[in-house]
Image: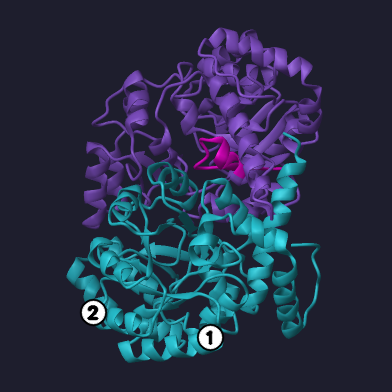
Chain colours: A cyan, B purple
Amino acid sequence: MGDIILISNYKYKKFILSYKSIYQTNLTYSLMNNAICKLFQIEYPIIQAGMIWCSGWELASAVSNAGGLGLIGAGSMYPEILREHIQKCKKATDKPFGVNVPLLYPNIEEHMKVIVEEGVKIVFTSAGNPKTWTGHLQEKGITVVHVVSNVKFALKSQEAGVNAVVAEGFEAGGHNGREETTTLVLIPQVKKAINIPLIAAGGIGSGQAMAACLALGADAVQVGSRFVATPESSAHQAFKDTVVKAQEGDTILTLKQLTPVRLIKNDFCNKVLAAEQTGASKEELTTLLGRARAKKGMFEGDLSEGELEIGQVSGAITAIKPAAEIVKELMDDCKQTIARLNAIGF
Amino acid sequence: MGDIILISNYKYKKFILSYKSIYQTNLTYSLMNNAICKLFQIEYPIIQAGMIWCSGWELASAVSNAGGLGLIGAGSMYPEILREHIQKCKKATDKPFGVNVPLLYPNIEEHMKVIVEEGVKIVFTSAGNPKTWTGHLQEKGITVVHVVSNVKFALKSQEAGVNAVVAEGFEAGGHNGREETTTLVLIPQVKKAINIPLIAAGGIGSGQAMAACLALGADAVQVGSRFVATPESSAHQAFKDTVVKAQEGDTILTLKQLTPVRLIKNDFCNKVLAAEQTGASKEELTTLLGRARAKKGMFEGDLSEGELEIGQVSGAITAIKPAAEIVKELMDDCKQTIARLNAIGF
């Protein structure tokens, strides 16, 4: 990666990044020995998480152009909206990109039809049974990755024939596992259980955390929250600003009786917490949740009554930055961290 | 650290470890540049957590003799029992060791009196206000460390003048913070907030996790659960066996209305979870908890009705091993992990 060059002009930085990717063949060579870089044919082992209301074609293409893997989040899109995003993403980048599809959402068959028709090469599935779609997609030449939050489903995903697994810890934003296993504890156990490439997710917003996850045995990292606070994210500006302002302890995993989800504590979240503490039933919580809360919060910017899905690492995010700058910082800081560890002299 | 030598005989291994500590001056030199090794005058940046019912003089002295820092857990000891453990520990090791004192326990003044009278040099305080005792102990020449679970109390501890901070994440066993911040997310934020030495805790049971925490900015690690499953731990054999059998997802943070505590799910824990889900009051939960549940579970081996305090990392513990062997494995695996990261070639 060479030395750190501090340049504030974003376009110039993008040029340098692409210049470096051509000439620094050593780097490309070493990273092409990385299982995830090889699988996706990308330069850096950094995946941008597919997130509802936040990751459309602009964010996905920006991350892919910067050498990572961008993912369009299909969970908040009608099938024809997804088609539009895929088409725009193809125009915006000639690098690999993918689509994240939550398997429990409605319109799943139409989503998959659009994905196949538009020639998408990489699909991340989540929130459902990996057996249902993996074979079908792979027959169409698509690389399939499944997102899990425990060892049991990592094994099930491997049995279903997926090409890689994302293991996501308790600190992650949005929907989350019932075991509440954190990234630090989850990654080594999933690594031990499976023999396919492993991507760590949950709590990763810096190169230090990226190095930590590589130390735990991950081949690559999936970064969500950090990419919400970018100009390219489709989140409402008020939500982006809230993510930047968030401090340690400002999120909580709630709605555990329905589907556990990590939210920033706001008026809506506090109502849910109060209802839960007095023993609210599933039905009462479902009524309280109502419909389209996530859209209201993250896309329409209703900071009081919307669902604001974000990870614990929001507490460490202090500025909105271009996606390409985040990719470069992750790589630079990861490299520096490894050099610092090496200098301990064990 | 030289190459890995597989020797199953425990006494012979202890001899080799002490032989190496004399002759491998490079290692000692480099680690003595570590802020925590310097502070405590220890060989390896590994602290064994002071744990109720599990860490008496036998475990503490075994860890200290192996080059880490052993801590006697005073929380489950009457003052005269604590005195006995300190005296036995002094006889069993000429290396530094310490005592962990939960500040909210009864007998706290008597505990501190015993600690000063017995000439203990290192005290870890937890569960209380760091201002109350830090100055008093330091006036007696004692090095004071405070355990926190959020950034706010890390700053308060620094203001109180402590010599170092332990930042402990959500995945840790036993009593735990209300913010539920995981080790991966907590450590970098505490590191940024304070300028005194930092020890990471919660979810660390391997050299890979140790390397990960050093990557996050910690100077050292505190390891609890892994040392419960040792011959030297004073836990009941049935509890040790339960820790070894535990799988990922088998613990949960509960009793959040009282003091949050991470337990292995058993009959008692399930009763608490059921009561919480139906909106039990603090008073009802206090009655359900009753008295001496932790002793019943961890020390008397009542696996059904006792409180079984252990961290999430119990899911990765597969064998009871001597404490010295654990210290050596942590160091060897940490070293190997750093070498593996270095070989990525970033």
Along the viewing direction, whichever of B277 and B61 lies nearer the viewer: B61
Marking on residue A58: 1
Report whether residue B310 is seen.
no
Instruction: Name the residue rendered at 69%, 70% in the picture.
Output: A21
Image x and y of residue B35, in percent: 76, 38
The residue pinned by badge 2 equals A109
Q: Which residue does the image show at 43% across and 85% down from the upper left?
A: A86
Image position of B170 with respect to A242: above or below: above
The residue carrying pointer 1 sits among few (fewer than 14), some (14 to 19) or many (20 or more) residues within 10 Å by Cα, namely many
Q: In this view, does B261 lie above or below A280?
A: above
> Residue B339: where, in percent of width, then height?
66, 40
- Give the magenta-colored segment's residue range: B197-211
Q: Is there CB contact under 8 Å for labels 1 and 2?
A: no
Percent x, y for residue B16? 65, 12
The disc placed on residue B116 is none
Q: Per the image, is B208 magenta?
A: yes
Q: Is residue B123 left or right of residue A94?
A: right
- The secondary element bearing badge 2 is classed as helix
Q: The N terminus of chain B appears in which quarter of the rendering?
A: top right
Give the camera-side residue of A202 and B130: A202
Q: Earlier in the sequence, mark 1 or mark 2?
A: 1
Residue A328 placement: quadrant: bottom right
Find the distance from the CA under tag 1 to the CA under tag 2: 25 Å
Q: Mark 1 lies on which chain?
A: A
Front residue of A105/A89: it is A89
Marks 1 & 2 on one chain: yes
Give the position of the C terminus of chain B as an image quadrant.
bottom right
In this view, A166 is above or below A341: below
What amino acid is found at the position of numbered circle 1 in the picture?
A: Glu
Name the secondary structure under disc 1.
helix
Quadrant hosting residue B300:
top left
The three-letter amino acid code for the residue at tag 2 is Glu
